[in-house]
Image (tube, rainbow, N blue to C red):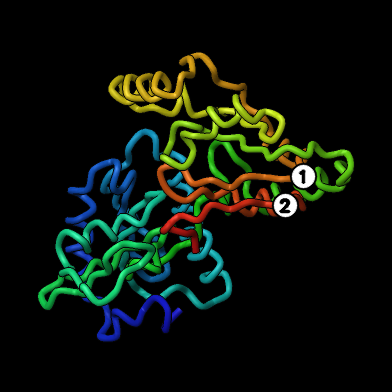
Amino acid sequence: LVDSYLSSYAGGVSRSDVDYAEAWAANASQFTAAGSWRARVVNGSLWVRPIHFYEHWKERASVLRILLLAAQQASALGEPLPDSELVFAAADSDPTVLHSRRRCHAPNTSATLHGRRRTRPAANCPRLPVFVHARASALGSTALPLPEYSWVGSYHSPPWCQMQPRFERAAAAWGWEQRDARAYFGGACSTGISRQSLLPLNRTHGELLHVLDVGFGRSGFVNPHDVERAKRSYARLGVGWGNFSAQLPPDYACRFQVLLSVPGFGYSNRLRQLLACGSAVVHVQHQSHEF
């Protein structure tokens, strides 16, 4: 942890650094940071001040449960968490990378990463010690990681300690020879470039793919403008707005021999679910990843 994540903060993190992080989060759009808050630990107790809670960010509030459980357990063991402060910003792509590109970096012509020009820190770069659950390590992120929200569950998903046995039972129930040999993807097919080709491919290569557009369509958008944008996106794909599959149990994936892990607007948190099925997983990497 010290070598990988805290090396940029060898001199410590000051309150002015945390104040700067809060100001940045307060001015971030819902696309940069879908939700954010500032937390303070005082005498072992956790205090939280919301910065932004966008409507579509409800499940990410579960990250607070991680901190609350940590504070409660540490106090129960007689070793309360030390007094400290932090700012957390939720997004499926590391929100600090865009900040760094705009405010803190100049071009470095001597190196590239995946065809992109790498950058070097500017001399007057303000530090941004924001905690995140999606970190782009390869792009020089200085963000600090927290566990991804679905480990402790959310309003629509049980915690992983309950989900893992469910996947193990499904994996045992569906032997390899019983499973469908096609490659399966179930998720929102309009979120991100990588997913938008899945439905057309499914129409032309149905013998190889089984793609279900699940869930996000009608309930996941936060305002009419997003709905209209999604309709235009589906029109470009030649897919009707009503072509949404009903919600399926996540362990439905265990019925297939090959599973596709494809990022949406950011990284996808379903990789561990797919691996738990014991199927072959084709994983499309995203620049951000969970801790």
Q: Is residue 232 left or right of residue 190?
A: left
Name the outermost residue toward the left.
Answer: 124
Q: Residues within 10 Å of mark 2 (few under 14, many from 20)?
A: some
Q: What amino acid is found at the position of numbered circle 2 in the picture?
A: Ala
Q: Residue placed at 21% from the left, 61% from the top?
A: 101
In this figure, which residue is indicated by the disc labeled 1? 257
Secondary structure under tag 2 reads: strand
Q: Kindly indicate the quadrant of the structure image that contains residue 10.
A: bottom left
Measure the alpha-carbon separation of dots 2 and 1.
Answer: 6 Å
Q: Residue at x 42, y 78 (%)?
A: 4
**Disc 2 to disc 1: CB gap under 8 Å:** yes
Report crowding for label 1: few under 14, some 14 to 19, many 20 or more residues within 10 A (C-alpha): many
Q: Position of residue 210 (x, y in %)?
A: 67, 32
Disc 1 secondary structure class? strand
Of mark 2 and mark 1, the one earlier in the sequence is 1
Q: Which residue is mark 2?
A: 280
> Looking at the picture, does residue 90 appear above or below residue 10?
above
Residue type (three-letter) at the residue carrying disc 1: Gln
The residue lying furthest to the front in this view is 204
- The answer to whether 101 is drawn above or below residue 90 in the figure is below
Image x and y of residue 127, in percent: 21, 71
Name the residue at 69% across, 47% down: 163
Work out whether residue 246 or residue 79 is closer to the camera in this orientation and state it: 246
Whether residue 245 is situated above or below residue 253 in the rendered picture? above
Q: Nearer the viewer, residue 263 or 160?
A: 263
